[in-house]
Image (cartoon, rainbow, N blue to C red):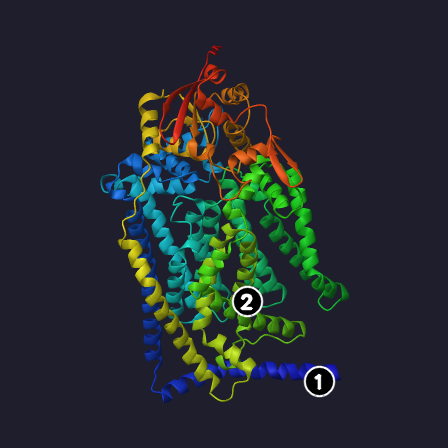
Amino acid sequence: KMSSGAADLRQRKKQNCTESDKMAPEERNKENSKLGRSPKYMLIQRFAKLFFGCLAAVTSGTMYAVYLSTYHERKFWFSSRQELEREITFQGDSAIYYSFYKELLKAPSFERGVYELTHNNKTVSLKTINAVQQMTLYPELIASVLYQASGSEEVIEPVYFYIGIVFGLQGIYVTALFVTSWVMSGTWLAGMLTVAWFIINRTDTTRIDYSIPSRENWALPYFACQVAALTGYLKKNLNYSAEKFCYLLVSASTYTFMMMWEYSHYLLIVQAVSLFVLDNFALAQTEKVHEVYKIYLFSLFLGYLLQFENSALLVSPLLSFVAALMLSKCLQMNMKTGTFMSRLLKMMNVYLVLTITVTLNFLLKMFVPHKENEHLLKFIEVKLGLNTTKNFTMNWLLCQESLQAPSQDFFLRLTQSSLLPFYILVLIICFFSVTQVIFRRICGEPLKETVKLEDGRIGERPEIVYHVIHTILLGCLAMCLEGMKYLWTPYVCMLAAFGVCSPELWMTLFKWLRLKAVHPILLALILSMAVPTIIGFSLWKEFFPRIMTELSELQEFYDPDTVELMTWIKRQAPVTAVFAGSPQLMGVIKLCTGWMVSSLPLYNDDDLLKRNENIYQIYSKRSAEDIYKILTSYKANFLVIEDSICNEVGPVRGCRVKDLLDIANGHVVCEEGDSYAYSKYGRFCHEIKMNYSPYVNYFTRVYWNRSYFVYRINTVISFQS
């Protein structure tokens, strides 16, 4: 009887809720008519807000793209440089990406250009590669098609068109962040503050300054669009048209993001985990979350087919995780609700999903042949201290600044711009509010259908919960690897700006403080306008003059030694020559001259990694005969030695290339905490400059300047004393 009475009570409450929901629009209309606001007036007001918000978002994105273009021109003097001098500004892997864009434009037809890239044997000696798959060259394919199809050959030079597209994408990136904070807070003032913080902290939000063609600069704008669309899609009480639009945008941007960056699925699994937590505690509509899972699966399989059956996508943790989530959901749906087994499955859902994920991923790796990213797992083992190694490549990666823990300067910069303090404040309030909501859900309390401002429950909004979990997960990664800050900091800007501009956040805080002296709703509304305004004025006063100084200063980037080297190669070296040297320099040689090289600055292929390690031996303490055998095994004709590597004085001893080689080759002996270098041979890069036997027997110096020494590798060895 008690149970039936409770059921009747719940039914009556439900009826009252539905009646109040039906009455709400009528009451709103009456209230509006009392205030003199007709539905037509409200429609005009809403349209004006939307129009000016969109205008501000587009203007912010456009101004940021123009700012990047102007800064780039001031830094490199691009318009006054010759083509060779412009190309030298692309360093390392950036040079390789741009070189393939050049090759596509030189091809007699687009089809022929794609074929030559997919069957490329003119880049790396003794190796035919599918460059489109291995280096994710879809951005270059799109850029070359647009350049030729738009008839831009007579209007703009290829390099300007290429970097213009990248700068345009950065404008879209900023616009997407603007829209995300606007959707979350309800005011485009939050969007303006997001953009301001993003630009001020540009050193920590983007790598666009010194690596324009990198894959992340092409991919992350699409991820930002996906996050903006997902934020709208997760909102409650969204009308059908808006929901459908957000769904389609999530689908398109997820797939495009996956095609642009080979590591995209690792970032998407962080997002999938955030959605899983959201769904596990019933903080969002299950149907919506599972629709996003289906988008992941569709994008993975379509990407697998269009990326030349890329096995890395099939063995990716994302596929295993999403498949485990779908399987777990099917098991729960097939169980009768209320039974012991169904309750047990719900309680053990996290354990079940993790178990299925690990098992499925293990089985896929057993049956699907793959070589991709194996070095990544080895790196993680060493990074976490689970293993030690003397391997040159692993230790070289560990020494890279982007793969180390963030420095104190990073946190100091974020604090000076006031971003970090406000982010921590917003995150703490949102996190505790979300924790309260999760506790209520565990106790069986349902979520409110509509959260009002006076409720002070910001943690009940699913899009807020998603961003809190997402930013915490990205933050944990950024605390381990400094390179991850470029994924985390933009969303720090967005979340901090949303929080200070959101009356709901301030109302949640006042609800906890039980503020009675001043009307809390009025104070929340005032603070949501006053705080961002004060922050905006202080940022304008302190940082705007610095930004204008950056744009007005003429910086000079000129590398005459590299220009001379490239000019000599183009004039003196045979067309069939193969060059050997550091991978970073080989990328520049390939771009500027088109000559074949023996290695590339790419780290996603085991064979290329082994080549890089072998050719780096020119800076080790090994004999002339050993180096000669290594170079001739790759059919190299010329050797380029860089003085900057040979005489490197690094800030961290033990992280210089020559130190890492000595460790890998066993030429370093450690006794009582001190290390001693020992080898029967001198350092090759020093000894070869002395021009004595046996070095002159194997190598003949043909060119040198202050930075580079070029040696021809002798085909006929003459043993002279």
Horizontal and vertical percent position of residue 112: 38, 30
Number of dots carrying numbers: 2
Figure check: 370 above or below 637: below
> Which label sits on residue 414?
none
- Tell which tag, 2 or 1, sits nearer the viewer: 2
Helix, strand or loop for disc 1: helix
* Pointer 2 local density, CA inside 10 Å: few below 14, some 14–19, many at least 20: many
**Contact, mark 2 vs mark 1 (Cβ under 8 Å):** no
- Residue wearing tag 1: 5
Horizontal and vertical percent position of residue 610: 55, 31
> Which of the pair 98/393 is nearer the observer?
393
Figure check: 259 above or below 720: below
> Which label sits on residue 465?
2
Figure check: 254 above or below 81: below
Q: Residue at x 63, y 56 (%)?
A: 325
Residue 567 occupies quadrant: top left
Viewer can see residue 438: yes
Horizontal and vertical percent position of residue 211: 40, 45
Horizontal and vertical percent position of residue 486: 47, 53
> Which of the pair 65/285 is nearer the observer?
65
Residue type at the position of mark 2: Val
Residue 561 occupies quadrant: top left
Horizontal arrangement in the rendering, residue 686 relative to residue 161 (left or right): right
Q: Earlier in the sequence, mark 2 or mark 1?
A: 1
Residue type at the position of mark 1: Gly
Q: Outermost residue, left direction? A: 154
Question: Spatial distance from mark 2 to mark 1, Cα to Cα?
Answer: 35 Å
Q: Residue at x 35, y 37 (%)?
A: 88
